[in-house]
Amino acid sequence: MKKVNKAQLRLGIFIPMALIFLTAIVLGLVAPKAFYDAENVIVQYAFDSWGWLFQLCGVVFLAICIWAGFSKIGNIRLGGENAKPSLSKWNWFAISLTAGIATGILFWGIAEPITHFMSPPDMLGLEPGSEAAAMFSMSQSYIHWTFIPYAMYSLAGIAIGYATYNMKKSYHISSTLYPIFGEKTKGWVGTVVDNLCLFAMAGGVAAVLGVATMQIGAGLNYVFGIQATKTVWIAIIAVIVGAYVISSYTGLNKGIKFLADKNSKLFLLMLAFIFIFGPTKFILSLGTQSTGHFLDNFFSQTLYLSPLDGSPWPRWWPIYYWAIWLAYAPLTGMFLAKISKGRTIREFITVNLILPAVFGMFWFMVYGGAALDLQLNGAGIWEAIQSNGLEVSVFEFLKNYPLSTLMSITFIVAIFVSVVTLADSMTSTVSSLSTTAHDDPEAEPPGQVKLFWGFVMSSIAIINLLAGKAGEISGIDATKQIATVAGFPILFLMLLMGYSTIKMLRNHKKNDVSYYPELEKDENTVVKTEKAI
């Protein structure tokens, strides 16, 4: 096997996953209805049998992160006392924000608050368009888009960072399970874990590519009159893939850092524009009251499952969200660990959980609050969504503001840059996982492997959208299907990772080679003795 960037294929990871995804692509092309039906069976089983665990795990992961960040454990520095950061705090935050859920808040920042406001779950007895519906709408958006998703990412990031930099284990996701499985993490346990994570991430990225494609297509239609046909979808995905593969080729310190910096500044500009030109007083009043409602009802809304009434709402909203965050979590955590050496765990939680979560709350306060105000004053955003899909919501919203065409184009650019940034970081991580580059957090995987996974994830995205049409569901519901399929197996891995992380950090003085170098010698002595026996 020819070496490229000193990395070779891990055949036990690359071959099975390549076969699974290529088979899915062929099935989606030949029998899209069968592809959709297979997804639906898995999603229904995950919700019926394990929905309760999806809901609980989000709260559990958040609790673990709070403990790790704000107890004395938070003083532990990833890489040891003398480790130095490679990024400024701004670049670190910008990459964390844009490699996480940035694409999602662009799509859902208006679509979700309006949907819950005008169509709250029937079983809750809320009158559409009422103040009670507004409180539910805003607080539920905060739940879905702030602390819990970033807690999932942060838990995985702390676990991988600590295992890699402090315990001197390999840069593998499976290394986080060393306290449970020991040396087996270098064998079959590691292979199973890495295969599961690669499967989940490829499916998760495909879902986000699908969402971004639909929204860019809707924007092109609104601004330039280009109809969002299947051909246009394929062209949009091709451009996105070309951009993120080129960016991925340049590596972390060029492509991703540059994109994240510009994208974060663009986000701040867009936030300021709506806050200044929108209903500022209404935004502040609604944001203040809905924050109180969020704090008062956090647990009841986060854990809602409708077991008696049997509402399908939890399947299509919180379970979908938890599944897609779970699908991303291990490899996003792997990426966040890579850029966090030299930072304390408290700094890690602050920059990778608290600050992005607070930013997400402000985003939904401003965009969601302004959208609700427009709807109450007859703007017809909800009517446009019902006629043309959720993907048109932001462009229907922007029609009511000055410089609407310019802002719509800015949104299209922001969506494009956001999905390129996210897909760039995840393509690099998936490629690392399927090559020996994953042994070294500083190594870049081969360019050919990045090209291959870029092709696979983009193909799954477009086929899933087409399969959704064959199954007679909307494009966004099709992306929800594949996201849930991708995240379901990771639910169990993340629970194991949470338990293992607690064990690692509680036994810091027994595990941490970076602080206590003599442990590395002792461990090597034990390993050599075991081999001799």
Image (spheres, rainbow, N blue to C red):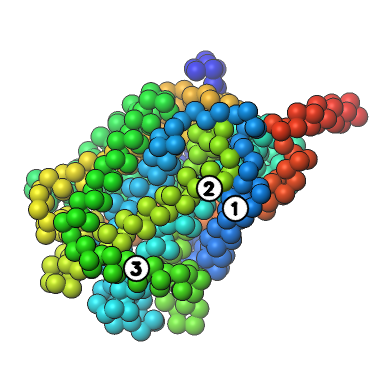
Identify which residue is drawn at 65% across, 32% down: 80
Tell me if mark 1 has few (under 14), some (14-19) or many (20+) residues whose alpha carbon lies within 10 angstroms of its own: some
> At x 23% / y 68%, what residue is drawn?
282
- Label for residue 288? 3
Q: Secondary structure at mark 3?
A: helix
Q: Earlier in the sequence, mark 3 or mark 2?
A: 3
Which residue lies at the image location 43% right of the left edge and 63% below the top edge? Answer: 143
- Three-letter residue code for mark 1: Phe
Check disc 3 and give the amino acid type.
Thr
In the rendered image, which quarter is residue 82 located in?
A: top right
Structural distance between the alpha carbons of marks 3 and 2: 25 Å
Is residue 143 shown above or below 185? Answer: below
Tell me if residue 343 comes above or below residue 402 in the rendering: above
Secondary structure beneath label 2? helix
Query: Is residue 334 shown left or right of residue 468?
Result: right
Whether pointer 1 and pointer 3 mark residues with C-beta atoms closer than 8 Å, the reply is no
Q: Which residue is mark 2?
A: 349
The answer to whether residue 61 is above or below residue 25 is below
Toward the viewer: 154 or 454? 154
Sequence-first disc among 1 and 3: 1
In the displayed orientation, state which residue is furthest to the top: 2
Label 1 secondary element:
helix
Frontmost of labels 2 and 1 is 1
Do tag 2 and tag 1 residues touch (Cβ < 8 Å)?
A: yes
Instruction: Residue 473 in the image: state x and y as whole percent.
Output: 30, 62
Q: Is residue 216 left or right of residue 142?
A: left
- Residue annotated with mark 1: 70
